[in-house]
Image (cartoon, helix red, strand yellow):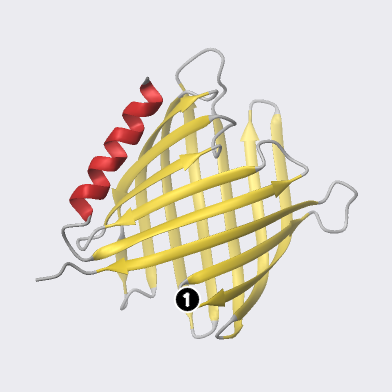
């Protein structure tokens, strides 16, 4: 029942945001050799830079997470940071403090997603997670770079460096990641990202 409450709150956000100019996007990541395999994400950004994000299977398997915050930009949108608060329900139950950060300079770009999630039930464990990327836009339809994931949870400290390549067509991105590429335990992630800018008809 609580999961459906998060979906209801997110649907209200969708309805209110679609009365002004803003962006709506969807992301799906397929993790190979890990469980869960598929992680869908939907995000919204209003004309005044309010931001909402709905995740599934991200914090843990069979877990819904709803995040909300505001995006702040500096220098003609060349640098942005989005602090957020979130709450998760499912196999992981807890509250999260998170932020997304992005910047670009000419053909180079940097991005980072960082969160600390505090468990609210005994069957869940608090954790810290960060996913950072540094890349170069080779041309309009292709980019490449490096990516790092770091997870800290109880006795676990996992650092996973990786490489990425990405293809783009209009407002569709297809990123491909290989983490620990030179080790036997390497993992692969393939994503599909779509973003649409909506303008209210007057």
Query: Measuring 38% from the left and 38% from the top, which residue is drawn there?
Result: 66
Residue 115: where, in percent of width, then height? 48, 42
187 left or right of 121?
right
20 left or right of 141?
left
Disc 1 packing (10 Å; few <14; some 14–19; many ≥20) = some
Report the front residue among 34 and 150. Answer: 34
Residue 29 sits above or below residue 49 on the image: above
Q: Which residue is farthest front?
A: 201
Query: Measuring 64% from the left and 40% from the top, which residue is drawn there?
Result: 151
Which quarter of the rendered picture does the C terminus lie within? bottom left
Query: Measuring 55% from the left and 85% from the top, which residue is drawn there?
Result: 140
Residue 164 sits above or below residue 116 on the image: below
Report the front residue among 43 and 184. Answer: 43
Report the front residue among 100 and 42. Answer: 42
Residue 93: where, in percent of width, then height? 47, 23
Residue 148: where, in percent of width, then height? 66, 56
According to the picture, the residue beneath numbered tag 1 turns out to be 104
Which quarter of the rendered picture does the N terminus lie within? top left
Residue 30 sits above or below residue 1 on the image: below
> What is the secondary structure assignment of the residue under circle 1?
strand
Q: Which residue is farthest left?
A: 202
Residue 29: where, in percent of width, then height? 60, 52
């Amino acid at each position: 029942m609580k999961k459906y409450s998060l979906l209801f709150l997110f649907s209200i956000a969708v309805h209110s945001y679609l009365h002004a100019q803003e962006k709506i996007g969807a992301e799906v990541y397929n993790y190979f050799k890990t469980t869960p395999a598929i992680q869908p994400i939907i995000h919204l950004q209003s004309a005044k830079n309010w931001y909402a994000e709905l995740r599934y299977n991200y914090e843990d398997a069979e877990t819904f997470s709803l995040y909300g915050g505001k995006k702040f930009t500096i220098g003609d949108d060349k640098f942005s940071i989005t602090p957020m608060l979130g709450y998760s329900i499912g196999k992981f139950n807890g509250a999260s403090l998170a932020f997304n950060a992005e910047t670009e300079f000419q053909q180079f770009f940097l991005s980072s997603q960082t969160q600390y999630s505090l468990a609210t039930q005994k069957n869940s464990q608090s954790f810290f997670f960060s996913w950072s990327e540094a890349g170069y836009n080779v041309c309009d339809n292709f980019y490449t770079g490096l990516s790092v994931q770091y997870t800290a949870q109880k006795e676990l400290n996992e650092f996973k460096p990786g490489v990425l390549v990405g293809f783009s067509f209009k407002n569709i991105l297809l990123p491909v990641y290989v983490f620990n590429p030179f080790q036997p335990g390497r993992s692969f992630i393939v994503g599909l990202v779509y973003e649409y800018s909506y303008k209210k008809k007057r």
